Image (tube, grey):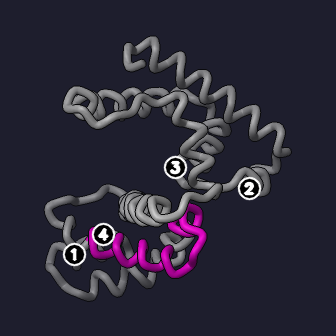
Amino acid sequence: MEDREILALFFARSERALNETQAKYARYCRTVAGNILPDSRDAEEAVNDALLAAWRSIPPQEPQSLRTYLAKLTRRAALKRWRARDAQKRGGGQTEAALEELAGVLPGGTDPVQTAEAGLLAESLDRFLAALPETERQVFLRRYWFMDPIAAICARCGFSQSKVKSMLARTRARLRRHLEKEGLL
């Protein structure tokens, strides 16, 4: 079934929308969640949470790309579940490693001023990513959006581990300079 037909089912509030979405995108969403959550049961729960979030948010949201929208919801649900698990037991998994790599670059905090600036940061990141060469953008997104392990990125792109690690380090440094230039650091 085409995405526009699935979206029409969501707008008609037909439960069939969930069945069709699950049939078409469950495997993809499990991969997104599985890159963040090592336990397959947690990943499955994150996918279920993402489907529920899609049901609750469409309408009024009308995503241009259902696949991307579901990946965003799945990633958000998986990170929420990971944080809850991590609060109970600290570990040294891939998600923690990827988040720690970015911690030195991105501003953080929860005060109202920083919350208001989050939109500016998102726009700045969009501009930064759009300016990157395709290969560097894909490696950066695979690591920090999809939380892929370095080894998986190497296999996907055909690069050595040292090349991927150095590419990520250079891209983080460029991101830091970009954010400093835009006054966000």
Give the alpha-carbon distance from disc 3 to disc 4, as whole Å: 25 Å
Q: Which residue is mark 2?
A: 156
Please provide the residue range marked out in magenta.
32-54
In which quarter of the view is residue 141 placed? top right
Q: Is residue 20 above or below residue 74?
A: below
Give the alpha-carbon distance from disc 1 to disc 3, as whole Å: 26 Å
In which quarter of the view is residue 17 placed? bottom left
The kind of secondary structure element at disc 1 is helix
Across and down, in percent, residue 100 comes to 57, 41
Q: Callout 2, which amino acid?
A: Arg
Say if residue 71 shows up in the picture. no
The kind of secondary structure element at disc 2 is helix
Give yes or no for residue 20 being in the magenta stretch: no
| Mark carried by residue 145 | 3
Is mark 4 in CB contact (under 8 Å) with mark 2? no
Left or right: 66 with respect to 163? left
Q: Which residue is mark 4?
A: 4
Of the image marks 4 and 2, the number of the one nearer the N terminus: 4
Say if residue 57 shows up in the picture. yes
Of the image marks 1 and 2, the number of the one nearer the N terminus: 1
The kind of secondary structure element at disc 4 is helix
Assess disc 3: are there few (<14), some (14-19) or many (≥20) residues with their C-alpha within 10 Å of its C-alpha: some
Give the alpha-carbon distance from disc 1 to disc 2, as whole Å: 34 Å
Is mark 4 in CB contact (under 8 Å) with mark 1? no
Of the image marks 2 and 3, the number of the one nearer the N terminus: 3
Q: Callout 4, which amino acid?
A: Arg
